[in-house]
Image (cartoon, rainbow, N blue to C red):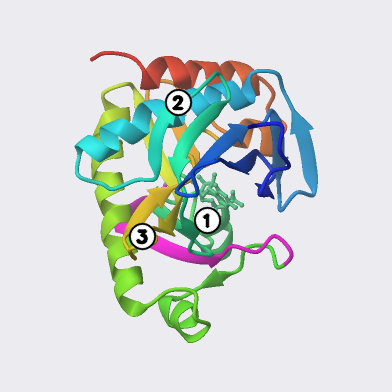
Amino acid sequence: MNQAAPLYEGKAKKVFATENPAEYVVQYKDDATAFNAQKRGQWAGKGATNNAITAHLYPLLEGAGIPTHFIERLSETEQRVKAVKIVPVEVIVRNLAAGSFSKRLGVDEGAALERPVVEYCYKSDALGDPLINTDTAVALGWASEADLARIRELALQVRDFLVPYFQQRGVTLVDFKLEFGKLPDGEIVLADEISPDTCRFWDMATGERLDKDRFRRDLGGEAEAYAEMLKRVTQEV
Ligand code: UDP
């Protein structure tokens, strides 16, 4: 089944069709990219770690009432998911200023925000994932007004679950990126990964970065940081 050509190959994952048209298999790769794939690298165990972190969190999110595409982890690097049509809008939720937000607005990294910020980007590597607003997404037919309202609501529910979850494990969730998909019946569900590739995680005690910024900013120790995040995520508190 997995020997077939992928339906889709992204920077860090491959998606395979299965004999069941309602399900896909997602395979996590060891490849890392940053700055819209201008910087490339890889390390052993990255795919397995991101698969394990995502597979741990998704059932917890389902338990918190957030519908997702996740079905089950199949192997070290693979998971079975519901086939969805991905909405081509990346949803970024920010709890503290960092990264492109800090740069764009001249705000120090780590600065507090009076309320969480939800941003939308058009999912296009060729264009560098440009920032958009919801009018743009509706005008270009990527999602309806109702879909976007639901996406925002779910993104904030994910935040409300994850912030205390990580805080209890000694980690500040600074910001994160989500993607959503549509089931054939039109229901919007959370899709894609939640991992150190897609979240900024700062150690609450030391401020150490435990996420892809280690790779983006050439800080080193990325494999150790990802392994530490898997340990924290799966830690009983
Ligand atoms: N992010 C992501 N994929 C992207 C862009 C951003 O997963 O294509 C995540 C990133 O890891 C961070 C958050 O979204 O946790 C906010 O990223 P930001 O806009 O600050 O961009 P960056 O500084 O990564 O360019």
Residue that numbered label 2 is attached to? 73
Residue 169 occupies quadrant: top left
Task: Identify which amino acid the numbered label 1 is placed on.
Answer: Ser
Q: 10 Å neighbourhood of mark 3: few (<14), some, or many (≥20)?
A: some
87, above or below 6, in the image: below
Q: How far apart are marks 3 and 2 (CA)?
A: 31 Å
Which residue lies at the image location 48% right of the left edge and 77% below the top edge? Answer: 137
Number of residues whose C-alpha sits closer than 10 Å to that of mark 1, classed few (under 14), some (14–19) or many (20 or more)? some
Q: Check mark 1 vs ligand 1: CB closer than 8 Å? yes or no.
A: yes
- Residue 189 location in percent, x, y? 35, 53
What is the quadrant of the N terminus in the image?
top right
Mainly helix, strand or loop, the magenta region? strand
Q: Which of marks 3 and 2 is in front?
A: 2
In the rendered view, does 161 fall on the left or right side of 232?
left
- For disc 3, the marked residue is 117
Disc 1, disc 3: CB below 8 Å? no
Question: What residue is disc 1 on?
Answer: 102
Quarter of image, res 203: top left
117 left or right of 42 in image: left
Query: What is the number of callouts on the image?
Result: 3
Q: Where is residue 191 in the image (x, y as percent from the top left)?
A: 44, 48
Say which amino acid is labelled 3: Val
Can you say which quadrant of the picture contains the C terminus? top left
Q: In this view, does 219 lie above or below 11?
A: above
Say whether disc 1 or disc 3 marks the residue closer to the N-terminus: 1
The tag earlier along the polypeptide, 2 or 1, is 2
Percent position of residue 86, x then y: 50, 59
Figure check: 63 above or below 179: above
Highlighted range, magenta = 111-126
Indicate the amino acid at tag 2: Arg
